[in-house]
Amino acid sequence: MKFAAISDIHGNVDALDAVLADIDRRGIDEIVNLGDNLSGPLDAGATATRLMALDLPTVRGNHDRMLFDRPRSELGLWETWIIDELTPAQMDWVRSFPATLEYNGALLCHATPDSDEENWLDYRGTQDRLIARNRDEVEARLGNARQPLILCGHTHT
């Protein structure tokens, strides 16, 4: 089986269109989405419209969750930029994402199976640099997950 995984779009509909065109050129017709779809300074509304039409298997990212799990006064900068431009239908779509999803035997999550904020494969060290976790640390974050393929986003790497 051949499918593409996309993640951390953050409202960049132009980059999304470029990636979707590349996926199409490669003849891949199945796509999964690992979350953080809209929050950012670009075009959240157009990004939501494009993604909603695709109806992809999608998991919730931390910035997706932040759009609905806190009072407006506690929203992060990326969320305050877009909250007023999203329609009620777009917000319902964001609220519908599960934290994890099994897709054809693969586990999809945004960061780890238990957290949409904790980096799975690395951590932030001094000067905010990413440092790879050792194998034991990575395996400890599996929780009950036993799928042979696990896909996560969040770190933008």
Image (spheres, rainbow, N blue to C red):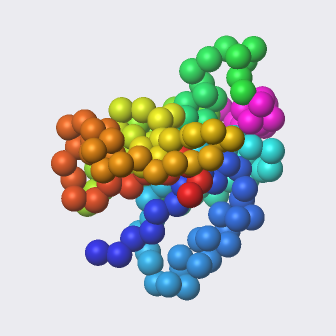
Image: 156 above or below 63: below
Which residue sits at x=74%, y=64%?
14
Examine the rendering and report whether any part of residue 105 can be seen. Answer: no
Residue 92 is covered by the magenta coloring: no
Image: 3 above or below 40: below
Left or right of 101? Residue 125 is: right
Residue 12 position, x and y percent, is 72, 56
Which residue sits at x=57%, y=21%?
69
Image: 90 above or below 27: above
Residue bounds of the magenta highlight: 77-90
Residue 36 position, x and y percent, is 58, 44
Give whichever of 150, 131 is nearer the camera: 131
Examine the rendering and report whether any part of residue 80 can be seen. Answer: yes
* Callout count: 0
Look at the image and tell me in which quarter the C terminus lies.
bottom right
Which residue sits at x=55%, y=31%?
65
Residue 100 position, x and y percent, is 36, 41
Give whichever of 5, 52 is nearer the camera: 5
Left or right of 143? Residue 11 is: right
Residue 93 position, x and y percent, is 54, 39
Look at the image and tell me in which quarter the N terminus lies.
bottom left
Left or right of 28? Residue 148 is: left
Which residue sits at x=42%, y=32%?
115
Give whichever of 151, 92 is nearer the camera: 151
Give whichever of 42, 87 is nearer the camera: 42
